[in-house]
Amino acid sequence: MENSRLKAFKNGLIKENPVFSLFLGICSTLAITTCVDNAIGMGIAVIIVLTMSNIIISLIRNITPDEIRIPVYIVVIATLVKIIQMLISAYAPSLNTSLGVFIPLIVVNCIILGRAEAFASKNNPMDSAIDGIGMGIGYTLAVLTMSLIREVISTGGFIVSNPFTTEKIFGITFIPEEYCISLFSSPVGAFITFACLAAAVGAYKAYADKKEAEAEKAKEVK
Amino acid sequence: MIAELATLLVTCVLINNVILNQFLGMCPFMGVSKKTSSAVGMGIAVVFVIVVASIVTYGLYYLVLVPLGLEFMDLITFILVIASLVQLTEMFIKKTSPSLYKSLGVYLPLITTNCVVLNVCLANISNGFDFIHMLVYSVGTPLGFALVLYIFSTIRERLELSEVPSAFKGNSIALIVAAIMALAFSGFAGLV
């Protein structure tokens, strides 16, 4: 049991990564990945909402009538998102302005409703929480990778700052300014980066499947 | 006044396009664009839902939530309005035109989780539009969505016949196409 939990957790990271392999929640992934700061903020917000919504929906799964389950889930998610939005606008106003409308739009992020419907409505709260954290980290990893690539190519380096005080914590430069491609901070760069990363994950998946099939074959021969 | 409204319309259809510039509604953009006929159906359904949803949420916000001081309930109210509107549309189309209902299939209920709808309702409020501006914005935005969805679906139909590196097959090459479309659409930026 422990083993399968770990496996499910690991699955969410690469092979079943919600963003690059299941193509869920790509709206926010494309939009907020212009810099690393935004990606971290958004990732944390999604992890919190996803874990909490999974736990709550799993707790009420037995008393929710089947016909109206989607509206019930949406109300639970919308309430959580509103709480997060109010907290962010109170304590991290700069993050609030840079993420903008994409905080309230977490409500319609397919990952959250998708996990509620596919996992939390059928499993106990403990498993649902683990699933929520795993999928949330998968999403965060995806947005982090993308924002890193985009920020480095478009500005030459990246900067991490404290979201509560906007104070700079860490900054590094790899490429001199005259070699930066500013196009990568625009929508075009978002689409291209995403396409290449999705292709890489797809290629890795095909490779892993092939290896698994070969291993199985070798077992059969023995 | 009319010139200003026309500018707003052009801005939200071409320049500030929801898909290529704001990345909203990506799920149906990737999911429904494999066939031109379903792309057109989806486009029309989204235009209808957004126009009705904007009018209802706009009225609800200014006539109910603001007088009661419940502005923080906007997200929950709006998403409930959208969900029930989509459900109503589905029932209405099912009853009046079963053939259209069949061709739209599963995409009809999925409009609920289309972020364009919620975004338009929220933007109407946060931009402080009056009723006429709100109407123009709520017609223009989904029109831009439908236009790009249609163009994209015609390209994707061609793409099915061409040879693509195996790793890029499917969604990845479609995203490259979207990138080129975004590049083309950024040329509209100087229009207004």
Image (cartoon, rainbow, N blue to C red):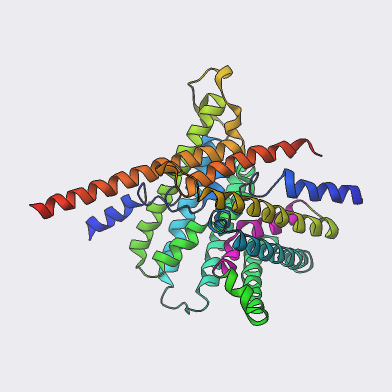
Q: Nearer the viewer, residue B67 or B191?
A: B191
Q: Nearer the viewer, residue A26 or B56?
A: A26
Q: Is residue A161 visible?
A: no
Indicate the position of residue B171 as horizontal and vertical percent values.
Answer: 49, 49
Q: Is residue A54 left or right of residue B154?
A: left
> Per the image, is B43 magenta?
no
Q: Is residue B27 left or right of residue B47?
A: left
Asked where in the image residue B95 lies, by quadrant, the reply is bottom right
Chain part drawn in magenta: B106-127
Q: Nearer the viewer, residue A219 or A107?
A: A219
Tell me the residue at 74%/37% (across/down): B189
Tell me the residue at 67%/66% (across/down): B45
Indicate the position of residue A108 as horizontal and vertical percent values.
Answer: 56, 59
> Per the image, is B116 magenta?
yes
| Total number of numbered discs in the rendering | 0
Tell me the residue at 63%/63% (across/down): B42
Indicate the position of residue B3 as horizontal and vertical percent values.
Answer: 90, 47
Indicate the position of residue A213 as horizontal and vertical percent values.
Answer: 22, 51
